[in-house]
Amino acid sequence: MNFEEIDLRNKALYLDKFEDLSKYKITIIGLGGVGSIIPLSLVRVGIKKLVLIDKDKVELSNLNRQIAYDINDVNKLKVDALKEKLVKLREENSLDISIYPSKIDDDFNLNILDDSDYIIDAIDDIKAKIKLIKYALTNNKKIISSLGMGKRIDTSKIEITSLNKTHDDPLAKKLRYLLKKEGTNELNKIMCAFSFEVIDKSKFIDNNVIASSVFVPNVAGLSIANYVINDLLK
């Protein structure tokens, strides 16, 4: 099989910068609605070095929106299931994928991220987001965080901007407040994917379930992946 054919159109698009993509290492934290599509798209475009971090297993309830998984992946660790998918997209042994079935908490060793060129935060734990952002700012690492995508239906209202410019997103508001409270004021250096779609709370009867479909989370994930590639190559 001629694996070079995979990259014919990538090379035509990125020209002399294409070869640089294989040099970068990208860490994706959170392999759910937003995060699961990101490694699939990065490997397809030419990224060869990935770090995948997620403590969860694939559940049936994930399959309506988490596009990386299928029925055969249920009860597998997400990091394992995704790695299995990724190694089928490239020539054997051409990928360098490290996996950690872990949670970002006080016990997590952030030094794992030291050689990453980009950190993608696609988790919904706000304490973990703050921990990652503070690490990135302290260590001069590029980071982009996904904010609230649940209960949204309009993909056209997804935007990528710095945290200080986000609006109409309760998670972004809380994140800004907590970071400032902890003395972190460089909000202009924290890039985010957020939705400015205003949620009509009256539509949702059961607030114990975060309503979501396949569209908004995956558009957000693809937008993040595209932003990261363009930012690395600019």
Image: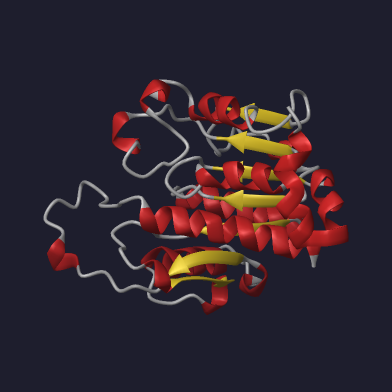
Taking the image as shown, residue 200 lies to the left or right of residue 18, namely: left
Residue at point 25% right, 52% down? 211
Residue nearer the viewer, 45 or 204? 45
Taking the image as shown, residue 77 lies to the left or right of residue 188, namely: left
- Residue 198: x and y in percent read 30, 74
Residue nearer the viewer, 113 or 122? 122
Q: Quadrant of residue 140?
A: bottom right
Residue nearer the viewer, 162 or 181? 162
- Residue 105: x and y in percent read 55, 38
Taking the image as shown, residue 132 lies to the left or right of residue 64, namely: right
Residue at point 55% right, 61% down? 223
Q: Quadrant of residue 111?
A: top right
- Residue 61: x and y in percent read 29, 35
Q: Please, which colouring scheme is shown? A: secondary structure
- Residue 181: x and y in percent read 53, 66
Residue at point 70% right, 58% down? 229
Q: Quadrant of the C terminus?
A: bottom right
Q: Quadrant of residue 155?
A: bottom left
Q: Is residue 100 above or below residue 48?
A: above
Taking the image as shown, residue 150 lies to the left or right of residue 28, namely: left
Q: Quadrant of the N terminus?
A: top right
Q: Is residue 81 visible to the viewer in this orientation of the structure?
A: yes
Q: Is residue 140 visible to the viewer in this orientation of the structure?
A: no
